[in-house]
Amino acid sequence: SRWLKKEGDEIAAGDVIAEIETDKATMEVEAVDEGILGKILVPDGTEGVAVNAPIGILLEEGEDESALKDAGKSAGASSGGAPAKEDPAKKDGAEMAKAPVEEKTMEPRPSPATGSEDGDGRLVASPLAKRMAKQAGIDLSKISGSGPHGRVVKADVEVMIRDDGKAAAPQTQAEGAPPAASKAPAAKAPAVPDELLPPYEEIAHSTMRKVIAKRMAESKQTAPHFYVTMDCEIDALLKVRKELNDRAPQDGPDAYKISVNDFVVRAAALALLKVPAANATWTETATRRFSRADVSVAVALDEGLITPVIRDAGGKGLATISRAMKDLAERARAGKLAPEEYQGGTFTVSNLGMFGVREFGAVINPGQGAILAVGAGEPRPVVKDGALAVATVMSCTLSVDHRSIDGAVGAEFLRAFKRLIEDPLTMLL
C-alpha cells in the first residue's frame, strides 16, 4: 500500500516500515533487524505482490551500496510471484525485507484513514499512474482514485485518457517491482444505453468486497447447497437470559450482558458436539470431521462482513462467549483483528434478527460445511395441547454442503439445536 520509510533512512528493529493491504485489513510491517534501507524493490501502490517476495533491501552495519548489486539480482529472481528457492535473507551481506505471510508474522494495526491525499497532503497515486498522467498532460487531482484508500491507479488514468480521446500511454514496469497482477477484463458495455438510465453513482470495489464476491460465487458454484428450517420457541430462553443479566456484575472484568445470539452460538456448538457428522467440511481427498466446535460469527462492516471465531465455543460458558464476542466485534469494526481471529472456524452463525428478518438462507463460508441463518424472535400463533396460543418463535435455517453432510445429518443437527434453544437450562449443565 505504501512505504513509511524511504531509501537511505536508518531503521531500528521494531520500526514500522510499510503498510500492506490484505482482503480484510491494512496491516503494518515491522522491521526485525536494524540497518539502512538501501533499496526499495516494490514501490508504493503495487498490487498483486506475492507472499515471500522481497520488497526491499536492508544494509547492515559496515555495508555500503556495493552490497546491493548481487542482492538485487537475487531479489529479482524471486519477485515474480513464486518464493525464492534459496533463502535470500543473508545474500552477500544484504538483508532482504519480504512481503510477510499474513498469518502469525505481523501484528495488525489500524491504518490512518486516507482518501485521494495522504496525511501530508500529497496526492496518492501509483508511480505508473503518475508517469502516465504526466505524459498525457492530465491533472491527477481531478481523478477519483479506485485503488486502495482512494489511490489513483493505472486504470483511472486510462479512463481519463480515453474520455479525452487520446491514446493510452504505454505501460512500463517499475524497476525491481514484481509484475503487476493481471487485470480483470474490461466490463462490457451495458445492454441499455446510459441515456436511458436514471442518474447513478459507481462505487469502486474495495479489496474486501472483491474477495467477498469471489468467495461467495465460488461457494455457490462449487458447494451444492440444501436448506433445512426449524422454528424454535424462545420464551424460556428469554426468561433465563433476563435472570442471568439481572444477576450480572455491572462493571469490572466479570461484567457481561448475554444476548440471544450468545445462546445461539453456544447451542450451535453443543449441537455440533452431539452430532459430530455435521461438524465437517469437504476436501478433494477426504471429508474432514472436526472434534472441536470453533464457531464463526458474521459481523457486518460498512465495506462488507467478517467472521471472527469463538474457539471451542462448546467448552465456554455463556458469559465467556458474551465477553469474547463483544471484544471481537468491536475490534473487527476497528480493523484490529489478527488473521488467526477470523480464519479457521468449523461452522458459522449469521443472525439478521436485529433487522426484523423473519427467515433467510445464508451462503456457506468456503472451507466449512454449514452455516446457520437466524431470524427474528417474534410473537406467533402456535397450537399447544390442541389449543391456540401465542409464543415467541425464531426461525433458523441451516445451509448445508451436500458433499460432506447429508440431509438426515442436517436435520439431526437442527433437532439437537432446537432442543437446546427451547430448554436453555440444559446449556448450563
Image: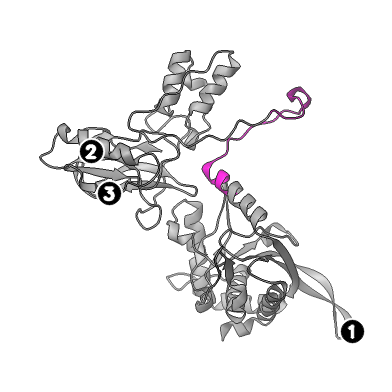
Q: CA distance from mark 3 to mark 2?
A: 12 Å
Mark 3 and mark 2 residues within 8 Å of each other at the beta carbon: no
Residues packed near mark 3 inside 10 Å, few (<14), some (14 to 19) or many (20 plus): few
- Pointer 3 or 1: first along the chain: 3
Q: Amino acid at mark 2?
A: Ala
**Mark whose residue sits in front, 3 or 1:** 3
Q: Residue furthest left?
A: 62
112 falls in the magenta region: no
- The circle on residue 132 is none
Q: Amino acid at mark 1?
A: Gly
Question: What is the quadrant of residue 399 in the picture?
Answer: bottom right
- Residue 316 vs 25, above or below: the answer is below
Residues shaded magenta: 189-212
Do the residues under discs 3 and 1 have CB atoms within 8 angstroms? Answer: no
User: Which of the image's four quarters has the C terminus?
Assistant: bottom right
- Disc on the earlier residue, 3 or 2: 2
Q: Which residue is mark 2?
A: 71
Q: CA distance from mark 3 to mark 1?
A: 76 Å
Observer-nearest of 355 and 344:
344
Label 2, residues with CA under 10 Å away: few <14, some 14-19, many ≥20: many
Q: Residue at horizontal 15%, vertical 32%?
A: 66
**Element under disc 3:** loop
Q: Viewer-proximal residue, 353 or 105?
A: 105
Label 1, on which residue?
386
Q: Give the quadrant of residue 417.
A: bottom right
Residue where numbered disc 3 is placed = 86
For image coordinates 52% across by 65% down, the residue present is 345
